[in-house]
Image (spheres, grey):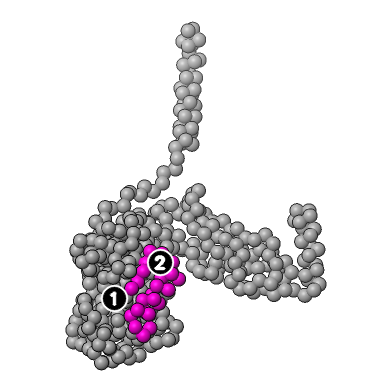
Amino acid sequence: MRVLSTPVYRRLLPLILFGLLLFVSKALAQATPTPQTMIPAPPQIAAKSWILMDADSGRVLVEHNSDERLPPASLTKLMTAYLVERELDRGNINLDDKVRVSENAWRTGGSKMFIEVNTEVSIRDLLYGIIISSGNDASVAVAEHLAGGEAPFADLMNQHATRLGLHNTSFANATGLPHPEQYSSARDMALLSQYIINDYPEHYAVYAEKYFTYNDIRQPNRNRLLWRDPTVDGLKTGWTTEAGYGLVASAKRDGMRLISVVMGTSSEESRAQETQKLLSYGFRYYETLNLYDQGAVLNSPRIWGGEKNELRVGVDRDVAMTLPRARNEELHARLDIRQDLNAPINLGDRVGTLEVRLGDEVVGEHPLVALETIEEGGLFKRLFDQVRRFFSNLVGGWF
């Protein structure tokens, strides 16, 4: 007790306490994890099925029953329009080509573009009529022109659904009118919209048009968000008694494009409001970063037996990644390239994988491809490389 009462201890006590405080503070700082961006639960959406996807990366941000098979109603016309755009892109048809309207197309019930039997209508007008007016008559006219009838056109639609990976989709007609073999899912509709936007951007502006006039009849686009949100520029509405009200929408803000799908809502107003909730949530809490450009050289590994010693390697398409805002510092990439690359190598050959991680989670994998063709070298070059590779493997890379 005498020691505790000495003047020396009293002078040292503040220093000891200060040292202890520094030690504890440092330990607490090391033990406290780095705070991450907090993402709230998605909003409550009054729909049977819904999904929100980034159009560039394909990442699904939020979803509910997105693989449930439901009647798509006029969302079906997204595939009808996609096939028209594909044929235009391949040069098999032109926008100014004329289509003669059959009595079968003219008599088709439901929503109409109001084409007249035995008249000739341009592909351009029919495409507008399908997308903006949701014309069943226009859809049947196109099906007959491209495939000779609606049944073979539906078969074509299903072949492309398989090609595009739409695993929960089946088409029986080009219109979306009720049929027991006609169904799709929110995920499939989002994927199809992604292809429409990215594959044929020259035709995508049609989906943002608010009105279309044909035969002196002016009809509005049924997508109410085109009037309410200037960033929304597509895509398609749908309704039948069986399906309820559906909407596939897309919006672009600050370089980020989102696709939302709601199926089975209760009204036109409901599908617009629920879609707005999804889009607002996605743009508020997520961002899309462009990581690598198509054709950019990411590495130049050794290639053996070729005219050149190094091969330029990169990605064959732009690589984008969608992630919660303010977490870009946690993003890193790893290149996994084949060890023994031998000539010949052709442009586009896959030589490895680009792996993208967000923290410890793998959030993307993309093929690494050759960005050039390298032919075999001469006999002396091939022999020299064989000897060099042998000694390199033998002594760990000294040669």
Which residue is denoted by mark 2 in the rendering?
A: 166
Identify residue type, mark 2: Leu
Q: What residue lies at 32% left-to-right and 49% top-to-bottom?
A: 41
Q: Is residue 352 left or right of residue 292?
A: right
- Residue 223, horizontal then vertical, whole percent: 24, 70
Q: 13 and 389: which one is in front?
A: 389
- Which residue is tagged 1? 175
The quadrant where residue 198 appears: bottom left
Residue shown at 31% from the left, 59% from the top: 50
Res. 74 in view? no
- Using the numbered discs, state the Cα–Cα distance from disc 2 to disc 1 in whole angstroms: 18 Å
What SS does tag 2 mark? loop
Q: Percent from the top left, x then y, of residue 241?
A: 21, 66
Query: Looking at the image, which is closer to me, 365 or 324?
Result: 365
Horizontal and vertical percent for residue 387?
Answer: 81, 63
Is residue 150 on the magenta stretch? yes
* Front one among 292 and 65: 65
For mark 2, does the 10 Å Cα neighbourhood hold few (<14), some (14 to 19), or many (20 or more) residues?
A: many
Q: Secondary structure at mark 1?
A: loop
Of the residues under marks 2 and 1, which one precedes in the sequence?
2
Residue 182: within the magenta? no
Q: Assess whether mark 1 and mark 2 are in contact (beta carbons under 8 angstroms).
A: no
Q: Nearer the viewer, residue 268 or 251?
A: 268
Q: Quadrant of the C terminus?
A: bottom right
Horizontal relation, residue 58 to residue 368: left or right: left
Q: Which residues are magenta?
A: 147-172
- Dot 1 alpha-carbon crowd within 10 angstroms: few under 14, some 14 to 19, many 20 or more: many
Q: Is residue 301 visible?
A: yes
- Residue 119: percent from left, percent from top: 26, 92
Most distant residue in the front direction: 180
Q: Amino acid at mark 1?
A: Thr
